Amino acid sequence: MSTASLSLNLPRLPPAVPRSGVSSEARLALRQLLGDVARRLADAFRDKVDTDELTQARAAAVERVVAHVWSACVGDSQRLSLYAVGGFGRGELFPCSDVDLLALCESPPTPAESRALESFFSCLWDVGLKPGHALRTLAQCRALAAQDATIYTSLLDARRIAGAAAPDEGLAALRAAAELWPPQAYLAAKRADREQRYARFDDTAYNLEPNIKDGPGGLRALHLIGWLGRRLFGAATLSTLVKRGMLSDSEAGVLEQARRLLSRIRFALHLAAGRAEERLLFDYQRTLAAQFGFSDEHGQNLAVEQFMQGYYRAAMALERLSAQFMARCEEALEDGARLPVQRLSIDFLNVGGRLDSDAPDLFVKRPAALIDLFRVWIEHAEVHGLRADLVRRIDAALEQGGDALAHDADVNAAFARLLRRGAAAVEAIARMNRFGVLARYLPAFGRVVGRMQYDLFHVYTVDEHTMRVLRNVARFAEADSSREFAHAHELWSRLAKPELLLLAALFHDIAKGRGGDHSELGEAEAREFCARLKLPDADIELVCWLVRRHLLMSVTAQRQDISDPEVVQRFATQVGEWERLDYLYLLTVADIAGTSAKLWNSWKDRLLSDLYVSTRYLLRSGADHLPHVADRVAACRAEARRLLHEKALGDADIERIWADFPEESFLRFSAAQIAWQTAGIANADKLDPLVLIEPYGERGGTEVFVHATDRDGLFAAITSVLDRLRLSVLDARIVTSRSGMSLDSFLVLDADGRALRDAGQLARLERTLVQTLAHAPYRADVAPRAPARTLRHFPIPLRIEFSAQPVRGRSQLAIVCADRPGLLAAVAHLFRECRIRVHDARIATFGERVEDFFLISDENDAALDAQACAALRAALVQRLEHGEERRHG
């Protein structure tokens, strides 16, 4: 379809009188004209017109307007020329893209020329264009280009659209100058620029809100291939690069397909946002998914997930091929005759630091070599890549026989040998994934490549998350891993078969997106694969158990009170044996830390560590019953007393304070916490209210202890203060002394998920709590705040559940809903209004989803009856589901 068929032929513009300027009426007409062009382009896009036609049509329309304004403002000056650069220079403009211009002047402009240029650029703004512009002489261009490869690159796309033709020859000579960014230097500069740019995007194409222009796998990767092709090989198109042997026909086809998809997404994104938005934000993902024809599949595979999987796969292909192209550029610039050659195995050679083979049909004759090459690669640290021809042979072998790899006994044996390399195998598996081998060898993994989960908890696609989990597992082999993960290195070093942990990590999420329980479906996949590897039955059962129960430890630690021996006993029974516990702990840690960089923190580390230690003790002792309550209380008291004696606190003071502590204290708190609370009360000048803060508490966060008169509204007042100070409450243990004083402990982290470190912040927290709790009655001010932008796109149905049977004589309440600022404070205030007392709280946030658990009673410390539960449920629904927000005092 031609530009003319889009009905974008512009009406004849009125003659521009040189240097007369553009009248206000003419500016309005030009603005209306460009608006009409934009509307027709949007209509054509909705009619499925090719995106290339549309971007070229806008570029052509804008060029006519810009040339017209240039003629009116600058005229026929022989000293001034105007060049389009950037996307405009390449002849493509997306709906809201800036119009990048370079004005070249024979020498520094005269005052009159400066006024003319100022009028020109001002008019472009007035008519609705957003010009990005520079004014330089040719000598200045050369000097700046010599210093900055980015400026040199912009000149590669420069195209004159108005003014004198005199600089054309000089600009062409500048671009071709051998001494200006010679090939090796230019390649190094573009590689450094690429790495710096990607560092801003976490070095992955799999961000939930990816930048489709500048992020990894974005359109800039394709531009990079074009720039390198032109500078290094004089090849301006993909087809020319194919002729030069730098790309294969199939690779050029993949690049072109990815470019067309990303271009169409970018065009749609600009239209949806109404601005030059390059980030595929949640705000637009559902809208674009519908525009691209996707629909939900029975709630199992959302339209937006299908749409984003298409994007991620295109981005991954683009990123992989651009990286390979850069490696080929390096190879092409080398003197092949002088490269050292070293034989590494019967099949593979090290040729100048890159892996190669001397048998062109190796992978056809022996498919297992597709696995062996990655094993050989990790065995030789001096090898830093693959030869270009070897990559082509890998691609050809996968295309020809990739479907048969999974059932080839020799291939499976080769993969089993690779796994036995332990932590080192992880890098080999990651490289297998990067070169497309893993997805062909393991079709179940291929199905989750690029698969996103439309939530804020899983910030990576399933395949990227899996690779990150595997890399975490590999870190456990390093001695310093225990700085971040309590028992990681110790447990890794005593695993009998680390390869089983690798298999469990590889399969734990492999069935995501199929509907049903992904753990059970993943277990079936793992069982079949392990059988193909001919693993012993016991090993297969361990891997399958880990895949099926990979969430068990995480759920137990984060959603239950692991200080309760019944919880630990139940978990130990489910685990059953020491070996499983070790493997499960390591898999759980790697999984949580690989889900999001913000998800792992000191609290989770301590939580899992405590659960591990408690369970390990039970499994080692072989205990089949819980310690008697009196025994647990006595043990806690004895250890706390010992710690207090070390603080020079005498028995008389200890007994005086403990006389007010209920037995429940010695069950709910550890001996170290009891000792800290007791010493704080003994040494306090003022007991009501008393606030103690331990910045680095034993539970992995900042511990806040409140000793104040236990009146209604205490929990609400405390949580309101914590909310106003932007602190996250992870755990709350609410105990009342015999004399009616609170013995409440809160575990908090700051907005970055860390324990509080700043002395000023700690002082402010203590001061604010003391001031708030000095009021009678307690005040609980809930400060309404707008939720984060991303949270608006993930509605979570409100779920309220009460336990069927009382727990320790109290009702258990679970609230599952969408997160929002001030949620806990709002719930706490509602408890106050309904005369509900809180005795325990477990606060868990999973992305946009909150799962809070409370032990509550009525004002008489009795479990809630059915009528009270119904009333509380109705009040919670009213407050949380209908978004009622008020300030309370």
Image (cartoon, rainbow, N blue to C red):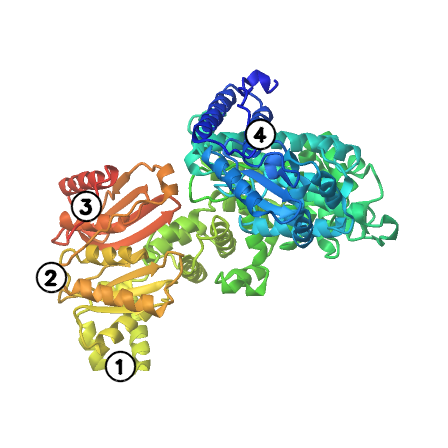
Q: Secondary structure at mark 3?
A: loop
Which of 245 and 458 lies nearest the eye of the viewer? 245
Q: Quadrant of residue 480?
A: bottom right
462 vs 479: above or below: above
> In the image, what residue occupies the spot 16% across and 55% down?
713
632 vs 579: above or below: below
Residue 613 lies, in percent from the top left, at: 43, 62
Q: Earlier in the sequence, mark 1 or mark 3?
A: 1
Which circle marks residue 649 in the picture? 1
Task: Name the amino acid, label 4.
Answer: Ala
Which circle marks residue 59 in the picture? 4
Q: Secondary structure at mark 2?
A: loop
Q: CA distance from mark 2 to mark 3?
A: 21 Å
Taking the image as shown, residue 877 lies to the left or right of residue 820, namely: left
Q: Quadrant of residue 226?
A: top right
Q: Secondary structure at mark 4?
A: helix
Mark nearer the viewer, 1 or 3: 3
Residue 658 lies, in percent from the top left, at: 20, 72
Q: Earlier in the sequence, mark 4 or mark 2?
A: 4
Q: Earlier in the sequence, mark 2 or mark 1?
A: 1
Mark nearer the viewer, 4 or 3: 4
537 vs 256: above or below: below
Which circle marks residue 886 in the picture? 3
Q: Residue furthest right?
A: 337
Task: Name the amino acid, label 1.
Answer: Leu
Q: Which residue is mark 2?
A: 776
